[in-house]
Image: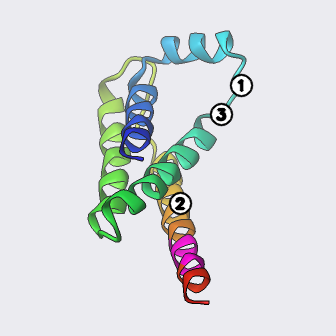
Amino acid sequence: MLVLFAACLLMLVVGGLLPGSGRDAIKGWLSLGDMESSAHFVLSGMAVLLAMPAFGWRWWIPLLVLAVGGFIEVLQYWVPGRSASWPDFAIDGAGVLAGVLIAWAINLFGKRESDG
């Protein structure tokens, strides 16, 4: 799980810091279309969801993932062809929240199954 957690964070960082021309070339090559928002949401949520079983319910996990998203947005100011965006940061936050809620639900229903 830790390797997948690290992979999600790495994909967020690399994808978020690619210059605009490089990002567009990769999207075209892989026929990905306009999926940046979806990638922000899914990777942020998956990172939180994967870290929770490994580290337990630690408050710093969602904050770390959200901070990585914010850091990427700040760094994009200096990346050619990219710009910082509050909506992208909000999408990261929504993904983090979704990851926390899914992890909470899995934990809750897992406890009910084992109790019952």
* Label located before the other in sequence (2 or 1): 1
Inter-mark Cα distance, 2 to 3:
16 Å
Label 3 with label 1: CB-CB less than 8 Å: yes
Region in magenta: 104-110
Front-most of residues 40 and 115: 115
> Which residue extends farthest bottom?
116
On screen, residue 108 versus residue 51, left or right, reads: right
Give SS at disc 1: loop
Residue 94 got which mark?
Answer: 2
Front-most of residues 93 and 78: 93
Residue 35 spot, x, y in % from top left: 65, 34
* Label located before the other in sequence (2 or 3): 3
Residue 67 spot, x, y in % from top left: 30, 52
Question: Per the image, is 13 magenta?
Answer: no
Badge 1 amino acid? Gly
Label 2 with label 3: CB-CB less than 8 Å: no
How many badges with numbers are in the image? 3
Front-most of residues 2 and 32: 2
